[in-house]
Image (tube, rainbow, N blue to C red):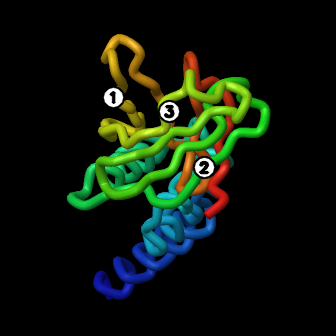
């Protein structure tokens, strides 16, 4: 009889906890099943103050720091006055292009870049003019300082 009561209490408690869980509990479980940067980013956009927010941010950082993580393709920014496009060649080389009217004043050549904690730093000549971008997701980079603007993946 005691075992039956324990099972009944356990079942009722489990049903109560399951039905009364918050929306972010179920959403985060689904995000963990999908296990992708875009899923974690979408979760943070909807539930920025969730009790799972730090775990989601940590998961994004892990994805970005994994060995071999590299951006690829070209990101362009129409509204940016100087730096119009950034093309990722491999996991540490990038080519940045400016507007045609700058002509020979703008060097189009390969530069090295590093990714650290969701930030891209392009190491230029001289180094005091390094360029910075925040990785919003796989298709959008947000330029900071001289590169201020939104860069969208085109290729």
> In this orientation, does residue 14 appear?
yes
The earlier-in-sequence mark between 1 and 3 is: 1
Label 3: state its secondary structure. strand
Give the x, y percent position of residue 57: 42, 44
Give the x, y percent position of residue 20: 61, 60
Distance between the alpha carbons at the discs numbered 2 and 3: 11 Å
Q: Which residue is mark 1?
A: 123
For the point 55% across and 60% down, which residue is it?
Answer: 38
Mark 1 or 3: in front is 1
Distance between the alpha carbons at the discs numbered 1 and 3: 12 Å
Label 2: state its secondary structure. strand
- Residue 154 quadrant: bottom right
**Dot 2: few (<14), some (14–19), or many (≥20) neighbours within 10 Å?**
many
Query: Which sits in the foreground, 40 or 65?
Result: 65
For the point 45% across and 25% down, which residue is it?
Answer: 131
Q: Which residue is mark 2?
A: 75
Label 1: state its secondary structure. strand
Q: Which residue is mark 3?
A: 133
Give the x, y percent position of residue 142: 59, 35
User: Position of 155 compared to 69: left or right?
Assistant: right
- Residue 8 quadrant: bottom left
Give the x, y percent position of residue 125: 34, 21
């Amino acid at each position: 009889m005691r075992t039956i009561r324990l099972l009944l209490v356990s079942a009722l408690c489990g049903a109560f906890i399951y039905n009364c869980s918050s929306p972010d509990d179920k959403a985060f479980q689904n995000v963990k099943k999908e296990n992708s940067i875009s899923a974690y980013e979408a979760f943070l956009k909807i539930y920025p103050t969730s009790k799972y927010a730090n775990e989601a941010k940590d998961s994004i950082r892990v994805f970005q720091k994994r060995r071999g993580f590299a951006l690829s393709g070209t990101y362009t920014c129409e509204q940016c006055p100087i730096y119009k496009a950034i093309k990722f060649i491999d996991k540490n080389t990038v080519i940045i292009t400016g507007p045609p009217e700058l002509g020979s004043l703008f060097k189009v050549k390969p530069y090295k870049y590093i990714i650290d904690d969701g930030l891209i730093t392009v190491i230029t000549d001289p180094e005091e003019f390094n360029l910075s971008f925040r990785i919003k997701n796989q298709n959008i980079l947000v330029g900071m300082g001289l590169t201020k603007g939104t860069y969208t993946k085109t290729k």
